[in-house]
Amino acid sequence: MVDNKPRRATRRSFLAGTGAVAAGVTLMPKFGWGAEEKKLNFYNWDTYIGESTLDDFNKASGVDVTMDLFADNDELFAKLKEGNPGYDVIVPTNDYTERMITAKMLVPLDHSKIPNIKNIGKAFMNPAFDPGRKYSLPYMWGTVGIGYRKSRVDGVPDSWKWLYDSDRYAGRIALLGAPGTVLQVGCKYLGWPLNENDPAKLEKVAELLIKQKPHIKVFAEDNGQDLLLSGEVDVTMEWNGDILQVMAEDPDISYVVPKEGGLLWEDTLAIPTGAPHPENAHAFINFVLGAETGAAIADFIQYATPNAAAKALMKPEYTDNPAIFPSDSVIERCETAIYQGSEYSQLIDRLWTRIGAA
Amino acid sequence: MENWRRNPLVFWVIGLPPTAWLLLFFLVPLTLVWVLSFAELRGVVDMEVTGTLSNYWRALDPLYLQIFGKSFVFAGLTTLVSLVFGFPVALAIVFAPRRWRAVLLLLVILPFWTNLLIRTYALIAVLRTRGFVNFALEWFWDQANAVLSFVGLGSLQLLGGRFEPLELLYNNTAVVIGLVYVHLPFMVLPLYASLEKLDRSLIEAALDLGASQLRAFATVVVPLALPGIISGAILVFIPALGSFLTPDLLGGTDSQMIANVIERQFKSANDWPFGSALSFLLMYLTFGALALRALYARRTAGQGRG
């Protein structure tokens, strides 16, 4: 992303030039470093923190946490893109963490203020999207696989074929409405790497989806689990945690990571640039990474924790659940999405538009 | 009414706040989007306003024009269905006893008291495979089968061996149903306003002079209600054209409308300049349609005079 041309008015300087229209609401730290007011603004996903975590943190530190919710990474990114409106801790997913690091939207973490880093499993300490964990720490992780209704499918639908390339479950299939994820998983099905960026190959995936489209009922907006629960569809591509939540309500529902492998994701804790309370943010991240706090959160939201000390405190129903912790052989076949720049995003969007219009 | 020239202070005091509001929160953001449509992406968050037209060229690709076309068809159908359903409703309210009118009008506006998202989710609960419509149909199916068994025809399975629920959700029909549901009040209210002013003696005269009910409706009521029909059509067509929530939640795999594409440019595709160009293209097309209509109206008015 090297810009060799002389820099003319960029979006940001353009905004600054036109006056205070967009800048008005940014909260600035009222006091200097070290003497922060006892407040913290946390920007999180829905139902993605322990029942009493925020109160417990308040009791331990006296800091009042205000939590806002975002529905997807795009919303989080779009909200912070024009400048941080006042958030201290955010929870982006790995490829968005990478995108935000590239865009200088995250501040480096001071590891000395987060002693609970020692609780994190070794496997999580040096990911490709944030080498050395300079900007982010792992919060939860999981997979994208297939949620299905046991009584309405033959055996275990353990291949993406049943969603991408077959009419066996015609009219009872839901895919995610996330363009990138659907095309990336299509690459996995066709035997290519998840992050394949050859336009010709991605084109092939799009053609496959156009052919399959008449059999797909809906590209679900993150509600595939509800469609499965209400009997609208019988097989759906979904995040494992979402399916786990409906598995608890309906024993006829199950989850599998297909044999071709799926998408492995990790949500991270990070501090956005311009955070008004960086001290409190470090303290909060440290608190969340504590063994007992981590266990309480994992117990409530039922996602896989990267916190080894927390996992050690959990019951076997959680630690031995293959829908939460897939076996190592399954994980080996999964891949993590990486951020591939604007041209890739535009290609994906164009293909997605074509799939929808075909 | 006093002339504002004679009392400019009152004019300024009353006129300034709304003008400032419109300038600050409508014109300025709109200008920003317009300027952005001539920008190029530079890296992840930076955009450079270079005056390029490439975003518009990209937007004129047949792929996007086809989606524009589809959105116009969806919005047009929505307008037509709203008119067909809205006209009798407006007429009924006009001819209702005076003390009932306020209540009936309130009932038309009542859905606005609930958030659009909630109303759309409610519609999902009505239309889905295990939704209220299919429950009702299944009940009728069961009753009919019970009657058939009672008269000794049960073994023939005249209604099929099993109730087959209708596929009402996740297709283009569901999108039009949803859009009509959301926009119907915008059609009923202007229709009511113009029908209410209608001089009823004209209808009576038509009937006295031997016109049938239908003829009186077609040649007297409809032409007199035309201003209401036109403003209702505009009020329904334009917001329906820019809908993205309804096709998102009720639509199937090919219910994508242009606003869904625009929304993605500001989110997952992270291509604000292209999204801005698409938005403005949509606006130009809408302006164009309105201008054509005004031109047509002026010409027919001219013919009428001549």
Image (cartoon, rainbow, N blue to C red):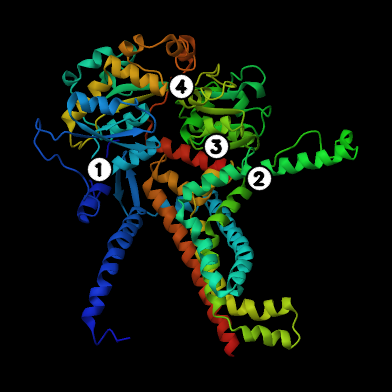
Labelled disc at residue A143: 4
State the residue lying farthest toward the bottom.
B306
Say above or below: B227 vs A193: below
* Residue B3, percent from left and from top: 29, 87
Precedes in sequence: disc 4 or disc 3: 4
Quadrant of the rendered structure where residue A342 is? top left
Type of amino acid under label 1:
Pro
Q: Would you say the residues marked 4 and 2 are in contact, meaning their CB atoms lie under 8 Å apart? A: no
Left or right of A26 in this view: A351: right
Q: Would you say the residues marked 2 and 1 are in contact, meaning their CB atoms lie under 8 Å apart? A: no
* Residue A224, percent from left and from top: 53, 32
Precedes in sequence: disc 1 or disc 3: 1
What SS does tag 3 mark?
Answer: strand
The residue tagged 1 is A85
Residue at 60% across, 72% down: B96
The residue tagged 3 is A219
The residue tagged 2 is B133
Using the numbered discs, state the Cα–Cα distance from disc 4 to disc 3 in whole angstroms: 18 Å
Residues at marks 4 and 3 on the same chain: yes
The chain holding disc 4 is A
Type of amino acid under label 2:
Val
Using the numbered discs, state the Cα–Cα distance from disc 4 to disc 2 in whole angstroms: 36 Å
* Residue B138, percent from left and from top: 72, 40
Residue at 55% across, 37% down: A219
Quadrant of the rendered structure where residue B31 is? bottom left
Type of amino acid under label 4:
Thr
Using the numbered discs, state the Cα–Cα distance from disc 1 to disc 3 in whole angstroms: 32 Å
The chain holding disc 3 is A
What SS does tag 2 mark?
Answer: helix
